[in-house]
Image: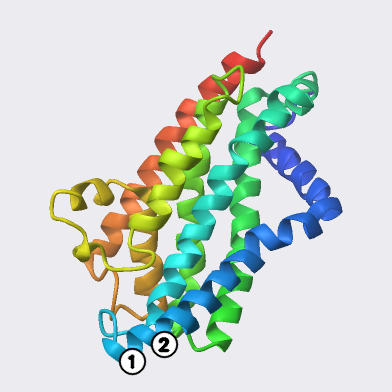
Amino acid sequence: MARPLDALTLRVTEREVAVFRKLWRGTLGFALVQPLLYLGAMGFGLGALIDENQGDVEGLAYLAFIAPGLLAASAMIVGGSEALWPLTGRLKWIGSYQAMVATPITPGAAYRGWLTWIALRTGLAASAFLAVAAVLGAVPSAWGVLAVPAAVLCALAFAAPIGAYNATQETDITFTLVMRLGVIPLFLFSGTFFPVDQLPSGVRPLVWLSPLWHGVELARAATTGGTAGADGPAVLLHVAVLVAVVTVATTVGTRTFTRRLTP
């Protein structure tokens, strides 16, 4: 007898956890150490120059300004990159999902189980990053713990649609373009390193469409207790946008996975 769909989804997540327990050392630098290096270099190095010459950025020391941006941006990179070559390995090169759907696990459960794992992995990395950032003085508010779910939402807002797209591709030829023309520009221009208000007025509406900008605003509002980033109704708007992206992309992804994995 087939298990309920939610149980099947969790079984896929358990499989991802079991694999990660064997390979976590190889991903530690990418998911945690690299963002912390950015925080040290930009927050203390460049930040010292900015604080000395400008005084603050949106009322914050540059270290406190950049920390939530890096938290959300690193979540985006983890979610986006995991939805490209690693997911193709499961779908095509290794054939993990073909083996799964030969059991009671459905293609939709495989996709949602993978997304659940992305959320769990991002939450763990974000919690560790936030703890170190707090020790360094980059999290001035106790509300900063809410930056973790903001980072998880941000990761899913990229993993879900890119994963849905991945299931329609036969090769990885377009993946480099996704990273270079999509993920990396968003990393640089979505409020991570400087306020979006400093961009030309014609460019700002494009930034407002970015899920990363919504994630950065939420994380910054959390770590600063609302003194920077979103406030009031804007918080609900950012959450609604990210949840909508994840919901729609998950629906599409369930369909593309089903088409891909159904004989």
User: Where does residue 59 sit, x and y in percent of width and height?
Assistant: 26, 85
- Amino acid found under the numbered disc labelled 1: Glu
**Residues packed near mark 1 inside 10 Å, few (<14), some (14 to 19) or many (20 plus):** few
In-front residue for pair 262/47: 47
Residue 176 placement: quadrant: top right
- Secondary element at image label 1: helix
Of residues 56 and 72, the one nearer the viewer is: 56
- The colour scheme used to paint the residues is rainbow
The residue under the point 47% across, 66% down is 70
Residue type at mark 2: give it.
Ala
- Determine contact: label 2, label 1, CB under 8 Å: yes
Q: In the image, what residue occupies the spot 75% across and 20% down?
A: 98
Would you say residue 124 is visible in this rendering?
no
Q: Left or right? Give the position of 7 relative to 249.
A: right
- In percent of width and height, residue 164 lies at 52, 29
Looking at the rendering, in which quadrant would you find the C terminus? top right
The span from disc 2 to disc 1 (Cα, nearest Å) is: 6 Å
Q: Residues within 10 Å of mark 2 (few under 14, many from 20)?
A: some
Give the residue pinned by disc 2: 48
**Residue 3 in the image, given as x and y percentages of width and height:** 74, 31
Taking depth in this image into account, of 143 and 22 the one nearest to the observer is: 22
Q: Is residue 21 left or right of residue 233?
A: right
Q: Is residue 150 above or below residue 129?
A: above
